[in-house]
């Protein structure tokens, strides 16, 4: 085992060092190198087809509702934006990744995009995993094994340390939502790290909806003490009230907003870092021209990407934990009983 | 004001803020864990919470920089 590791290290170093003479050649004129930004942004954004590799992509159905009728067709009809699709008297085309109608008719876009398909996949995975765990409780009463023994400590950790201790006495009502949100964010974060996956939790619409759920639950379940504390936080002198009231009211909206931005930015930034480090190979080889330079940068790039990948797995767990924890804390603040 | 690359400078400044903040949190947490090793678990949990909150604020800056440039 040790000999294999040594061989691997020596080989990578030799590959890296052998590319040095390529960079030492004098460049006649300065050309613009390969710009990786459009590719990176394309991989992070949503799209109407699931691009796997090279020219292979799975077309996804496009569902549009316009002028009282549903138009359903596969996104391959667009031929990457080169052709328009005509259904009845409506002509659709893709402009800058948006579907527009030629005569500017109003469209309600209900398509199955890459993120929607990935969310359906992760929901099926969640239903399978958690359903199997809950069914194994009904059957036998002996010691848990397999999937149940893997998930049970995690579920108990979320329920005891996050939900019970932060929401307080009334945690039963909110445990369903908080557990669901934890596992949804966790599975989608982890799925987003696999090759060819969609960037679900890095889509600000998805995190917006998740934080909206938290906001709605807080607002619905808040008792009178919560609203009184907004207007008069306990223990503040009256002279400070003109400052405290706007801050408190502002805080009602910034707390879910921060939840949304935190999850979105962490996941998207992680994906951008991984893509940028892989693009180092393409920038060094100028998109295939300079093969030796590309190969020499490859060991360094792969090493960095491996390091960042491990950090991203930690970030996946951490962001799910933080979202659930902060939601539990906010809900706990909203339903807190006054202790007289 | 059209300065090329100022979005990158903004993102770098917010990264400085995140680095200082999380570095201080980690340092204080390590000191506390050295003083009382039996409470390491609780200290570590609270360190992660505080680090995630600080990082959330720093990522506001990154998001604005991404939208600009």
Image (cartoon, coloured by chain):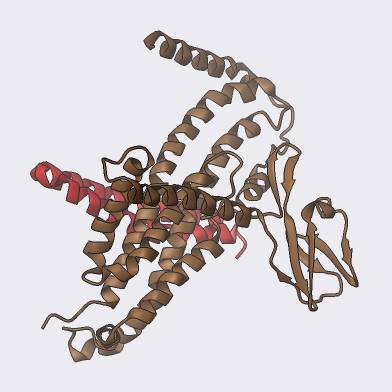
Seen in the picture, residue B52 relative to A301 is either above or below; the reply is below
* Picture quadrant where residue A21 is located: top right
Image-based side of A132 in relation to A160, left or right: right
Q: Percent x, y for residue A100?
A: 79, 67
The chain in red: B
Q: Percent x, y for residue A40?
A: 62, 46
* Picture quadrant where residue B31 is located: top left
The residue drawn where x is 43% and y is 34% is A307
The residue drawn where x is 84% and y is 54% is A77
The residue drawn where x is 41% and y is 64% is A259
Q: Percent x, y for residue A197?
A: 59, 45
Q: Quadrant of the C terminus of chain A?
A: bottom left
The reply to whether residue B28 is visible in this rendering is: no
Q: Quadrant of the N terminus of chain A?
A: top left
**Quick one: A217 or A309, which is closer to the camera?**
A217
**Quick one: A141 or A59, which is closer to the camera?**
A141
The reply to whether residue A208 is visible in this rendering is: yes
Q: Colour of chain A?
A: brown
**Quick one: B23 or A188, which is closer to the camera?**
A188
The residue drawn where x is 48% and y is 56% is A265
Q: Percent x, y for residue A247?
A: 33, 80
């Amino acid at each position: 085992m040790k000999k294999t590791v040594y061989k691997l290290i020596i080989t990578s170093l030799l590959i890296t060092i052998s590319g040095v003479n390529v960079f030492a050649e004098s460049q006649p004129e300065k050309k613009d190198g390969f710009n990786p930004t459009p590719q990176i942004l394309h991989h992070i954004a949503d799209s109407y087809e699931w691009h796997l590799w090279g020219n292979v992509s799975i077309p996804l159905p496009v569902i549009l509702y316009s002028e009282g009728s549903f138009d359903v067709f596969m996104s391959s009809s667009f031929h990457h934006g080169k052709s328009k699709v005509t259904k009845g008297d409506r002509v659709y085309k893709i402009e800058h990744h948006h579907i527009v109608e030629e005569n500017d008719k109003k469209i309600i876009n209900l398509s199955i995009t890459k993120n929607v398909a990935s969310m359906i996949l992760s929901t099926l995975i969640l239903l399978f995993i958690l359903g199997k765990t809950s069914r194994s409780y009904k059957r036998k009463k002996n010691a848990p094994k397999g999937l149940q023994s893997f998930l049970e400590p995690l579920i108990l950790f979320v329920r005891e340390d996050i939900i019970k201790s932060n929401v307080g006495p009334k945690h039963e009502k909110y445990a369903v939502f908080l557990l669901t949100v934890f596992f949804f964010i966790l599975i989608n974060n982890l799925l987003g790290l696999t090759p060819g996956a969609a960037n679900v939790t890095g889509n600000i619409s998805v995190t917006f909806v998740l934080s909206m759920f938290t906001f709605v639950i807080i607002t619905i379940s808040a008792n009178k003490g919560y609203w009184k504390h907004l207007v008069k936080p306990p223990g503040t002198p009256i002279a400070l009230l003109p400052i405290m009231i706007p801050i408190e009211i502002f805080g009602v909206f910034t707390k879910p907003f921060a939840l949304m931005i935190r999850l979105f930015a962490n996941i998207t930034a992680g994906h951008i870092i991984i893509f940028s480090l892989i693009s180092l190979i393409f920038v060094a080889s100028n998109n295939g021209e300079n093969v030796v330079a590309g190969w020499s940068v490859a060991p360094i790039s792969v090493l960095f990407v491996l390091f960042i990948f491990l950090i991203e797995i930690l970030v996946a767990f951490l962001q799910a934990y933080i979202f659930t924890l902060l939601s539990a804390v906010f809900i706990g603040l909203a339903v807190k009983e006054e202790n007289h | 004001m059209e300065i090329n690359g100022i979005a990158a400078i903004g993102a770098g400044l917010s990264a400085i803020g995140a680095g200082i903040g999380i570095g201080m949190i980690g340092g204080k947490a390590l000191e506390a864990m050295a003083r009382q090793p039996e409470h390491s678990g609780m200290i570590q949990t609270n360190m992660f919470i505080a680090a995630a909150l600080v990082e959330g604020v720093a990522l506001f800056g990154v998001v604005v920089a991404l939208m600009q440039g």
